[in-house]
Image (spheres, rainbow, N blue to C red):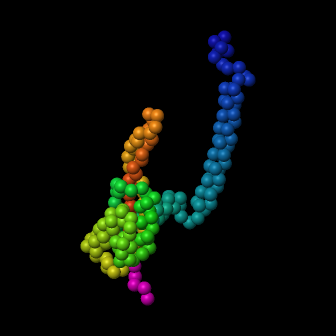
Amino acid sequence: MDKNKNTPPQNSPNSQKAKSEAKSSSSTEANKSKAIAKNAATSGSRKSSSKSSAQNLKAEKESSQTLKRELVPYGKGERESRGKARMLRTSPQKLNDVARTIRQKPVETAIQELRFSKRRIATAVLKLLRSVVANAENNKQLDVDRLVVKQAWVGKSARLRRFAPRAKGRSSMIIKEFSAITIIVEEVDEKA
């Protein structure tokens, strides 16, 4: 009798959910068994080759390790230098307008663009660009005359929330945004 009290009636929503979950789990199990059979079939064709499966696994590991060694993060190449400025007191939208003016340009042109820009934040970007160029020259011995701004991207940073008093005792939020910029310069071959 206790069992009957604890079990829900057959037409309740809970029992219908349980039935649908059981159906979905049985269909996923069927899909899994099909995938296992398919993998077994493909592995059987691999075994028929001259190499054993253990040798195949070893070869796959070695090839994946060589691929990992070849991958180089942005700005970490031999002919690249990168720099990042964080917590710049401007919105990412305004900073991106300045970054757009220097992308894919030679460093000398980019410096001139920033020097004569009317944007306030251009001075901070100019300082960062000069730092990146100095690092490229001193740390990586790159030729300054052949440097080009390869990439310049902008990201969000902290946001300060302040409140301004409004009518009828209310207040509205003032968001003071900060942003970050990353610049990568690359040494290119001289144009023919």
Q: Position of residue 19 (x, y in %)?
A: 69, 31
Say above or below: 87 vs 51.
above
Q: Residue furthest left?
A: 138
Residue 16: % across, % down = 70, 29
Q: Quadrant of residue 125?
A: bottom left
* Secondary structure, magenta segment, majority class: loop
Viewer can see residue 117 = yes
Left or right of 114 in this view: 54: right
Residue at the far top: name it.
1
What is the quadrant of residue 69 in the picture?
bottom left
x%, y% of residue 155? 42, 57
- Tally of numbered discs: 0
Residue at the far right: name it: 11
Front residue of this view, candidates 42 and 90 = 90
Residue 93 picture quarter: bottom left
Which residue shows up at 33% across the image and 81% down it? 145
Left or right placement of residue 116 versus residue 30 in this view: left
Q: Residue at x 36, y 65 (%)?
A: 122
Give above or below for 15 relative to 133.
above
Q: Is residue 130 left or right of residue 22?
A: left
Instruction: Give 145 or 101, whichever is nearer the viewer.
Output: 101
Q: What's the residue at 45%, 67% (across, down)? A: 100
Does the magenta-highlighted stretch encompass residue 60?
no
When the figure is inspected, residue 35 is found, relative to residue 70, above or below; the finding is above
Image quarter hosting the N terminus: top right
Q: Position of residue 36 (x, y in %)?
A: 62, 49
* Residues in magenta, as a range: 188-192
Question: In which quadrant of the rendered image does the C terminus lie?
Answer: bottom left
Of 103 and 53, which appears nearest the observer?
103
* Closer to the camera in the image, 169 or 186: 169
